[in-house]
Image: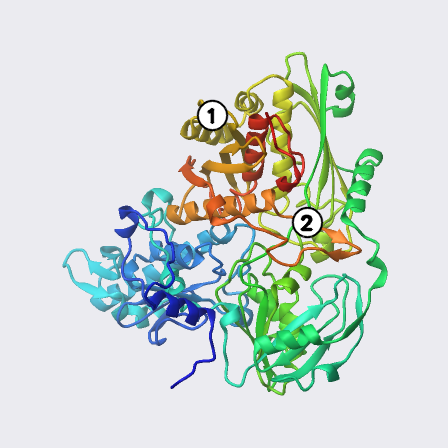
Amino acid sequence: MTLNRELTRRNFIVTTAAAGGGMALGFYLPGPQVLAATTDLEGAISGKPWIPPTDGAGAEVNAWLLISPDDTVTIRVAQSEMGEGVFTSMPMIIAEELQCDWSKVKAEYASAHRSLQEGGVYKRMSTNGSGAVRRSREYLQQAGASARERLIQAAATEWKVPASSCTAKDSVVTHTATGRTLRYGELASAAATIQLAQEPAIKTPDQYTLMGKPLARLDTPLKVNGSAIFGADVRLPNMLFATTKTSPIVGAKVKSYDFNAIRNRPGVHSVVEFQGEDKGRGLRSGVAVVADTWWRAKTALELLPIEWDYGPNTHINSKDVALRDLEVLNEKTGAVVLDEGNALGTMKSAAQVVEAVYSAPHQAHATMEPLGCTAQVKDNRVDIWLGTQGPEGALQDAARQSGVAPENVYVHNCFLGGGFGGRGSRSEVRQAVEIAKTLGGRPVNLLWTREEDMNNDYYNPSPMAKFQAGLGADGMPVAWFNRITSDSIFYWLRPEMVANGIDRIAVGGLANMPYRIPNKRVEFIMRNKHIPVSFWRAPGVNHNIFMLESFIDEVAHASGKDPIEFRRALLSDAPHLLNVLDKVVEKADWGKSLPEGTAQGFAISDSFGTIVAEVAQVSVSKRGEVNVEKVVCALDCGNTINPLIIEHQVESCIAYGLSAALYGEITLKDGRVEQSNFDDYPIMKLGEMPEVETHFALSGGDKWGGIGEAALPAAPPAVANAIFRATGKRIRSIPFKHHDLSWG
């Protein structure tokens, strides 16, 4: 009998799925328009995405693509695949210009090491800001077009004809006059040596034949059959495993620990201590236990006696912080972000003044895969394996921590089990490298527990904002005042970008709100707490649009006007916004008759270059139980690469945004984060997910907006506004779970 003691989650899924009466997995079955666009995707990507999906044979026409003799085109992807579809959308951009056979396209990660060695040949490798398409598209198109023209020139040279007499399509170059053909695989080696006199023009959207189609994602088969390797899955010969416990309070230090208490436990190898740093992307004070399995490391760490010097922050509590924020809003003048007309003077003479204070808490990234990193330090070389949104930053972190020159550091990027801004290398890389330095060349797989991931996060900022709107005799706003206090992401990560006391992310969506009001003033007061903050999906606007759109609804109600018509009047000089508003109002059948306790709410946002309007239909029981039944979304991102991926991202944004709005909060007691796992930091369950409709209101032209975050900001206020219309109760703070929404 063979006994398999390595019961991994992969083995569990495969075994239970194969067993009779075992485990049923729900999945989305795409419509015929999607199925028609798919081919056999098996093998399009290696389960280890840093490894070529082919044997590497072939010719590299440029740094972005390699063509094999059998016409397989391997396209390098410089962005990180964390569920947003870049392993499909990025190759589609290159393939559009290359005119290759899509069924023969494969993808792999571009190398951060190569990009460093070759002066940034892959340009932008950090995946953030919904920028994969909008910041990469043009040069990716250029790479595909350049390769195509080189292939055409190679064929023309072979036939001794002008290149202008040849065309390329479906991985074949054809001489139009004679019908002669050569395949890309036959031409690639010659094409790689050709230098063009000038780079060709790239296509405009009206010329696309591939982009804009709802193609199936190349990474789906790997993630269905369990062969996709995430950071937690990495296994290497002679590997050790580790997990960590960092200081329970930011600023606390390890005073002592007793290794002897666990030294003789099964499998325990060693304990490594981290010296604490208080700011930036450094290490917090803590310890790691290293063992021959992760479970043994975890259970030993739980038994390790640690004495802490808790430091100066033990008095900090969320309730006290909120009270102080409110005092600051009422007592202090902030740095002036926007000042148009005479808002303060006009407010005094307004026929009516509407005012309110809104707030939102810190929130964790709470990715399904906790953070971790595998590291090996050996012979003046460092290798790291992890899922990261910033492979170049991870490379530099590993170099700094190891003391090895960056050119001798190699990043092997894996698939990411969620990112949301939380996988930009917090401290997992530096921890793993610090541990690996002690192991004499053996690799170590570091994986945080969920509790450690919650405790050692860089959280979403926690803003509070005061709003005032002065209304004229006709009920329309004549003056607007907004003062925000919040902690600053840039204070923690890029202090040089905090100019004149203003963090532009902290005021995003508020300083540039689209509503036309003649007199406006916006102020900002920076209040940094002791816990670090960082980018969280749709940073800044995730909370600010909730506050803005909820208050606009509040002002519309005070003026006695329909919230849609009220906004239409304030957006009369913004046709691009009105176009999206009109689309969602039509598709959602705004104003339709609904049962008692059920209502629609509206919100709109313009972020990451994309306009999104959403109508949420929400029912609230008389006991106050909220059910988000449906969200209808209309968007204008200008143009599309893959509309199916856009639909998926809209659904993802709404799920993530509503989880945060309904339940999400990180609170402090005695300086410590109180939440530790999904029992006290819940997320939406499958049965709570609303039906989502996505509709396009595309403006085309040169507009290319981001998608990965754009649909999140409007979801919470649309639901909050629907709750008000259903119950008469206004929600001015997140999470909604703290509000008594009973009615009747």
Residue bearing the label numbered 1? 595
Q: Secondary structure at mark 2?
A: loop
Q: Which circle marks residue 202 in the picture?
A: none
Q: Are marks 1 and 2 in contact (CB under 8 Å)?
A: no
| Lower position in the chain sequence, tag 1 or tag 2 | 2
Q: Which amino acid type is shown beneath numbered disc 1?
A: Pro
Viewer-nearest residue: 591 or 277: 591
Residue 160 visible in this rendered orientation of the protein: no
Q: Secondary structure at mark 1?
A: loop
Residue 241 is left or right of residue 610, and the answer is right
Residue 306 visible in this rendered orientation of the protein: yes
Residue 604 is left or right of residue 42, and the answer is right
Q: Position of residue 643 (x, y in %)?
A: 38, 46
Residue bearing the label numbered 2? 362
Residue name at image x 74 percent, y 63 percent: 248
Q: Residues within 10 Å of mark 1 (few under 14, many from 20)?
A: few
Q: Which amino acid type is shown beneath numbered disc 2?
A: His
Q: Residues within 10 Å of mark 2 (few under 14, many from 20)?
A: many
Above or below, 558 relative to 33? above
Q: Position of residue 1 (x, y in %)?
A: 38, 86
Seen from this angle, which residue lies furthest top? 473
Above or below, 349 relative to 590? above
Residue 694 is left or right of residue 535, and the answer is left
Nearer the observer: mark 1 or 2; the answer is 1
Q: Position of residue 712 (x, y in %)?
A: 54, 43
